[in-house]
Image (tube, helix red, strand yellow):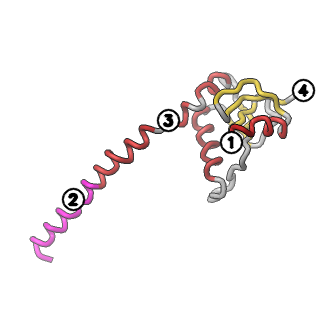
Amino acid sequence: MSFRSAGVVACALAAIGLCRSIWFHAVIETREAREPRSDVRYQSARKLLAGSAVAGYVSDEPVDDAPGEVAHLSSTKRYQQALYALAPVVLRYGDDHAPLVLVNLGDPARMDLVLREHNLQAVSLLTPGLALAKPRP
């Protein structure tokens, strides 16, 4: 390869890299900035769970709990976002007997049904599809 053709290849690669950087800064980051941060959804739950070490977690959709599973992406994403936003509180998936249980739904209209299925009563309805509950006596 001649010195001139190596220069052309280097310039082409630099141009591709520059276009890639512009794409990410102008399009991708702008799109992400418009979406609300996931931890904003859990701010009120964070305040109510302050001082708790452990809370239960139930949902209207199953969560993928084995490495590599991708059958329930949206519900798994909600669970992982809640884990991140509420840390250091430990959320135990499927535990509806904990003193406090986070109910995190994909379909807010199913709140009453999920509460009945898990024998829970709402302590606080935080946002549509998100509630803090406790077991019924």
Task: Give the amino acid at mark 4.
Answer: Pro
Q: Are marks 3 and 1 in contact (CB under 8 Å)?
A: no
The amino acid at mark 1 is Asp
Q: What residue is disc 3 on? A: 36
Residue 14 is marked as 2
Secondary structure of the residue carrying tag 1 is: loop
What is the C-alpha distance between the residues marked 3 and 2?
34 Å
* Marks 4 and 3 in Cβ contact (< 8 Å): no
Work out whether 66 lies above or below 35.
below
| Residue holding disc 4 | 137
Cα separation between marks 1 and 2: 47 Å
Of the numbered discs 3 and 2, the one sitting upstream in the chain is 2
Foreground: disc 3 or disc 2 = 3
The kind of secondary structure element at disc 4 is loop
Mark in front: 4 vs 3? 3
Give the CA distance from mark 4 to mark 3: 37 Å
Q: How far apart in space, not on screen, are marks 4 and 1 (Cα)?
A: 26 Å
Q: Nearer the viewer, mark 4 or mark 1?
A: 1
- The residue lying at 72 percent from left, 38 percent from top is 109
Q: Secondary structure at mark 2?
A: helix
Outermost residue toward the front in this view? 109
Depth-wise, is mark 1 or mark 2 nearer the camera?
Answer: 1
Q: Residue at x 79, y 35 (%)?
A: 112
The quarter in which the C terminus is drawn is top right
* Label annotation for residue 107: 1
Quarter of the rendering containing residue 53 = top right
The magenta stretch is 1-19
Q: Identify which residue is drawn at 77% across, 27% down.
A: 122
Instruction: Specify which label sits upstream in the sequence, 3 or 1.
Output: 3
Is the residue under label 2 in contact with that under label 1 (CB below 8 Å)?
A: no
